[in-house]
């Protein structure tokens, strides 16, 4: 489970004084691919799903409940539907969408969360589109159990016309291993909601299982289905999805490499990911790139990420079954990225997610959120290019661990987010009894707590997989940063608490 992100030496170059007309931002470079970006539309609120439609407009959902399309050339926008029933909260709302690629089937599939009393649920609805609106809603899947997180929702249409959709585990890991639960799965249904006769479990929409919260889904030209999936504190994944297979959550995270995982697969067959990331990157939308406009990217999965704010190009093997390499673009240039789509001409579009519940530092900017076109430009004249090696400031070892494992929630400045992630600045848990602090890191924390007069009731993952040394470094770091002044924690302290737990 600890397969570290292979360290990529990125040579970043910034193009100055670019003269491509109509371009509002000259942008990132790695290897031989020089990219430029152009904003198609701004002022949006978390465009969760973007898709190139059969009418050559980009169709998109916004999390609070609107479905629109935008002309990628002019930026003209048409709002097609507003759904007042949508319940938006944190990562919930109007999420996945798929427009049927075949014009003779004028359908749009939408998945969103709603509330029945206090119960959170989600549903998959098919609409029929006309020139300017959507009509005839037909509910295909109703009352999918939901939660305040992990609601899945990416939808795509398979080459054979079936509707594929991800569901999250609704924060109950056991759901993912229960074939009779609709949660923690990738589903496959017909476009009228009926269950295909060749599904692996008769009468059941489940196609694959053992998923935590997959929020990316795409088919390659070979017909392979890939999903991207959020891990817990470790092990984000890209999976090659096959009929009836089990991807292991919550019993196996990433590759099968620790004792409890090896034990688990003695009885249950688990498919390992095509790629896994620790520290986590928070993978969101994916899209297959089969075009040649950017020849270097041909036959890749394009993946956008939230936490690491990047567009990643995962080059596939010729048969499309394995990931050969990974390159990182748009690194921290646009903020959090939620989704990616590709035009038939091979232009790439990404959507930002800077107005969601967990914005990065310095975001949202005034014109967020945006849909941005990304395209290749010729190598600029040498005099206009500054090539610099990525310079990483020398950091305290504890700082590196903190930034990799804690800052996505508690933030780089330790201030957290009121009501969601507690602050680590000047709090009794951080500054007080060392053993209690170590214990939170080893075991995680859930259930209601009050920190500085504010209530919190979310899950803190366990960091049990970190070594005694690493736990001591990060604990010492948070006790001495953000204006905190408390004594250091040693590896021996951690060892004692860990052995007392056994
Ligand atoms: C995925 C988000 C997330 C990550 C990553 C995370 N935490 Fe937390 N942390 C939380 C949440 C949520 C809580 C509150 C849990 C609750 O409501 O019971 C919390 C609680 C805590 C607390 C107790 C706060 C108090 O005052 O009682 C400490 C200490 C803490 N985290 C430290 C860390 C450290 C150190 C790391 C990195 C090794 C880390 N956390 C990583 C989400 C996170």
Image (cartoon, helix red, strand yellow):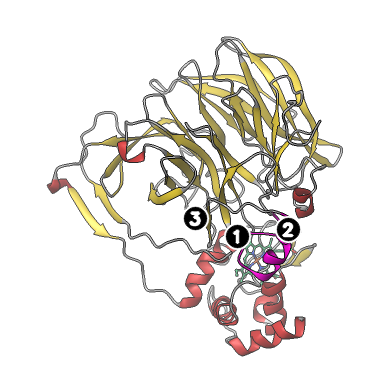
Which residue position holds label 1? Answer: 409
Q: Earlier in the sequence, mark 2 or mark 1?
A: 1
Residue drawn where x is 37% and y is 30% of the image: 291
Q: Earlier in the sequence, mark 3 or mark 2?
A: 3
Q: Respond yes or no on whether mark 1 lies under 8 Å from ligand 1.
A: yes
Quadrant in the picture for the N terminus: bottom right
Which residue position holds label 2? Answer: 458
Q: Is residue 289 left or right of residue 230?
A: left
Q: Secondary structure at mark 3?
A: loop
Residue at the farthest front position: 266
Residue drawn where x is 72% and y is 29% of the image: 198
Ligand 1 position by quadrant: bottom right
- Residue 168: tell me if it is visible: yes
Q: Cα distance, mark 1 to mark 3?
A: 12 Å
Q: Is residue 234 left or right of residue 302?
A: right
Estimate how packed mark 2 is, as few (under 14), some (14 to 19) or many (20 or more) residues with alpha carbons within 10 Å.
some
Question: Which of these two is toward me, 190 or 319?
Answer: 319
Q: Cα distance, mark 3 to mark 2?
A: 21 Å
Q: Which residues are magenta?
A: 249-268
Image quadrant in which you'd find residue 299: top left
Q: Earlier in the sequence, mark 1 or mark 3?
A: 3
* Tag 1 and tag 3, C-beta contact below 8 Å: no
Residue drawn where x is 53% and y is 33% of the image: 44
Estimate how packed mark 3 is, as few (under 14), some (14 to 19) or many (20 or more) residues with alpha carbons within 10 Å.
few
Q: Is residue 254 magenta?
A: yes
Q: Respond yes or no on whether mark 2 lies under 8 Å from ligand 1.
A: yes
Q: Position of residue 312 (x, y in %)?
A: 43, 47
Question: Which of these two is toward me, 490 or 325?
Answer: 325
Residue drawn where x is 41% and y is 51% of the image: 326
Numbered mark located on residue 361 in the image? 3
- Residue 369: tell me if it is visible: no
Q: Main secondary structure of the magenta part?
A: loop
């Amino acid at each position: 489970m600890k397969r570290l992100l292979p360290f990529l030496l990125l040579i970043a170059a910034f193009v100055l004084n670019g003269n491509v007309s109509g371009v509002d931002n000259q942008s990132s470079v790695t290897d031989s691919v020089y990219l430029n970006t152009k904003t198609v539309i701004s002022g949006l609120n978390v465009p969760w799903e973007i898709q190139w439609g059969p009418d050559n407009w980009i169709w998109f959902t916004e999390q609070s409940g609107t479905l629109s399309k935008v002309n990628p050339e002019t930026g003209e926008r048409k709002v097609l539907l507003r759904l007042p029933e949508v319940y938006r909260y944190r990562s919930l709302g109007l999420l996945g969408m798929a427009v049927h690629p075949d014009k003779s089937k004028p359908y749009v599939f939408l998945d969103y969360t709603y509330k029945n009393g206090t119960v959170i649920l989600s549903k998959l609805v098919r609409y029929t589109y006309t020139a300017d609106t959507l009509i005839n809603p037909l509910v295909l899947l109703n009352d999918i159990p939901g939660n305040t997180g992990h609601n899945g929702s990416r939808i795509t249409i398979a080459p054979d016309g079936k509707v594929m959709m991800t569901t999250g585990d609704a924060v109950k890991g056991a759901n993912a291993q229960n074939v009779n639960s609709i949660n923690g799965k990738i589903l496959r249904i017909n476009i009228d909601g009926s269950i295909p006769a060749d599904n692996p479990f008769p009468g059941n929409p489940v196609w694959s299982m053992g998923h935590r919260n997959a929020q990316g889904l795409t088919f390659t030209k070979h017909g392979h289905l890939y999903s991207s999936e959020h891990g817990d504190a470790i092990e984000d994944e890209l999976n090659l999805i096959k009929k009836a297979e089990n991807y292991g959550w919550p019993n196996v995270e990433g590759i099968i490499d620790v004792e409890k995982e090896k034990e688990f697969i003695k009885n249950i067959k688990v498919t390992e990911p095509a790629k896994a990331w620790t520290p986590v990157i928070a993978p969101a939308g994916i899209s297959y790139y089969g075009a040649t406009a950017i020849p270097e990217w041909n036959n890749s999965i394009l993946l956008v990420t939230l936490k690491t704010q990047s567009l990643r190009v995962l080059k596939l093997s010729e048969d499309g079954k394995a990931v050969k390499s990974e390159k990182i673009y748009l690194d921290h240039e646009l903020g959090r990225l939620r989704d990616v789509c590709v035009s038939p001409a091979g232009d790439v579009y990404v959507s930002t997610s800077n107005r969601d519940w967990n914005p990065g530092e310095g975001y949202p900017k005034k014109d967020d959120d945006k849909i941005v076109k990304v395209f290749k430009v010729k190598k600029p004249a040498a005099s206009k290019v500054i090539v610099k090696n990525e310079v990483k400031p020398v950091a305290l070892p504890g700082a590196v661990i903190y930034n990799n494992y804690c800052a996505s929630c508690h933030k780089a400045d330790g201030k957290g987010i009121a009501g969601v992630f507690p602050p680590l600045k000047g709090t009794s848990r951080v500054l007080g009894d060392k053993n209690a602090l170590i214990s939170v890191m080893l075991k995680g924390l859930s259930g209601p707590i009050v920190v500085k007069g504010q209530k919190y009731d979310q899950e803190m993952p366990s960091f049990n997989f970190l070594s005694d040394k690493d736990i001591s470094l990060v604990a010492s770091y948070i006790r001495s940063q953000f204006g905190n002044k408390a004594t250091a924690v040693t590896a021996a302290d951690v060892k004692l608490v860990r052995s007392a737990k056994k």
